[in-house]
Image: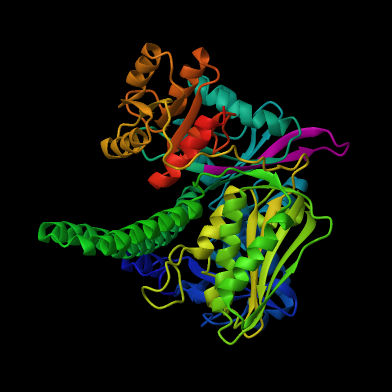
Amino acid sequence: MQAGIFSDERFRALFDQMDEGFCVIEFLDGPHGPLSDYVHIAANAAYAENAGIPNVVGQRLREMVPGEADSWVARYREVLRTGQSIRFEQELVKTGRLLELAAFRVGAIENRQVAVLFKDITERRLAERALEARVVEALAERQVLASVVEGTAAFVQVADRDYRWLAINRAATDEFEKIFGVRPKVGLSMLDILADAPDHRDAVRAVWARALAGEAFTEVAEFGDPSLARRWYEMRFGILRDDYGAVTGAYQFVYDVTDRLAEQERLREAEEALRQAQKMEAVGQLTGGLAHDFNNLLAGISGAFEMIALRLAQGRHADVEKYLTAGQGATRRAAALTHRLLAFSRRQTLSPKPIVINTLLPDLVELVRRTVGPGITVEMIGADDLAPAMVDANQLENALLNLCINARDAMPHGGLLTIETTNLTLDAFAAKTLGVTRGDYVKVSVSDTGTGIDKDTLERVFDPFFTTKPLGEGTGLGLSMVYGFAKQSHGHVRIHSQVGSGTTVSIYLMQHRGDVAIDSPAPAMTPAHARSAATVLVVDDEPTVRMLVVDALSDLGYHVLEAIDGASGLALLDATPEVDLLITDVGLPGGLNGRQVADAARTHRPGLKVMFITGYAENAVLNHGHVEPGMAVVTKPFSVDDLVTRVERMVRAG
């Protein structure tokens, strides 16, 4: 079994002890096109018993069964593409085995893996088909109860239009008596014999009436004594007609499918067990990476505080600035890590606007050139008629810069780095493959001529905390952040790479049909520490945050009021006519969140300016950063200088 997926001994034992064959296949690109072949990467012992092919691990499909490979690829590639499980029957021509199969995708589509559970049903299906063929032939010749029917385990009944039995085999007679408590007999009416059991009679009449009306169908139903184990039955109905085509009766084949349904339930449980094992592995990887990176940062922050306290106690004030700088640096790195986590989880606060991405690239290209050094040539190819896209410009620049840094690291001896924009239209098939809505998109690509990425690594590049860099030199959140940003922007990201030939990462963003956002000049700013007579109400249940905001604004001369929850904040607003700005945390206790406080305040003061302080969990309350005029959003963690600057801008905007 493949390491990782089946690292838990309980799940390995489950699959090795099953009677059903089991395997995991991994799709490959080949001469027949993308995803045109697959290799068996895991299989249990029962695989060979059911399929008739031994030692399949490591074998490619087109080497095993070249003549029938296309049909198997088509089945499983659809499972990989859609993520929808399927159940079907198909003959493995090479061994002449008829297989009953269930297939489901393993994890995300990028894994390229599908798991298959199957069972050899060749003998069972041949027996059923032979029986049905012989019985129908016997009925056509009026040989209603041939010896083959009498000897089969299937339950066979034939009835005329008046619900009277024309024939019933011994197995059906015994089973009918077991279920309904009365013994049927040729010539009797099934409705009459069930007259004392109206519920059973109505159920039997309902299903037979469909057949006697000329409908051939199959139905699964549950019967049995509630005090005993209930059984499930598959009922197949056919029609009897005379020489003129008129319906004269109906026949029924009944199969006890209780064991088959139980088998399907076992398959479902096995599928769920596989998913749970994979989920727990991902959770372990995520928490381990978080603990490692945050422990490093917390050590820097706590150590800086301890050294500051020690130096102040020693009276060595000159050293304090060094430790302040170290602690603030660690805090900024922690904030950056949190930002990447939020981008990966698609819960960062975005402020998308319609922009033409080409307008962002000149400044970005200059920054990239200074970052990557003289050994790498940076080229920009912008589409002449590039359509606007709805996107958060700052976060897009962060994502592109992240991709450019990855490209730089892939070209240690220099090379060419290209940033390119393109318009394109995705049809229904292409959009479904990417997991986006069909329509017109802007594609932004970052390409390099570097070392490239091998296949095994390429399948994991978007996983959180996966990195090829040495321990401590990379968080492993770079590409997962780009992926999360693209998805949160209702787009997608794809990566193509070949060892020795370089890598291309493309971000797809939906085109915007409307006006393009134009940045208006900011109002004139007074010096940073100018005095103000404005009144600000701060509502925050976290004492430390509230203290920092209140103290910083008070130092600038603001008249600052403070409240610990929404209700007390509204009370202060009612008691204080002149409040110029409301600063409120979004997540507040007491039943009123910050958005509700702002909306309630604006019903009486429509022009009240509001600044929201938000963490990712409350971002949905703000419609993901889409707020009304006169409102602004500050995302935690924030610097005091940034907060003060934004307060000054809002207050002086008039």
> Which residue is at the front of the view, 380 or 272?
380
> Which residue is at the front of the view, 43 or 388?
388
Q: Position of residue 44 (x, y in %)?
A: 45, 73
Query: Magenta part mainly helix, strand or loop?
Result: strand
Residue at x 35%, y 19% (from the top left corner): 567
Asked if residue 264 can be seen in this view, the reply is: no
Q: Position of residue 487 (x, y in %)?
A: 59, 52
Colour scheme of the rendered structure: rainbow
Residue at x 49%, y 49% (from the top left corner): 261
Quadrant for the C terminus, please.
Answer: top right
Quadrant for the N terminus, please.
Answer: bottom left
Disc tally is 0
Q: Where is residue 135 in the image (x, y as percent from the top left)?
A: 68, 51
Q: Is residue 314 magenta?
A: no
Left or right: 579 as drawn, with respect to 32: left
Query: Is residue 598 positioned above or below 216 on the image?
Result: above
Q: Position of residue 125 (x, y in %)?
A: 61, 60
The range drawn in magenta is 233-251
Q: Which residue lies furthest to the right in this view?
A: 244
Query: Is residue 223 positioned above or below 24 on the image?
Result: above
Q: In which quarter of the image is residue 65?
A: bottom right
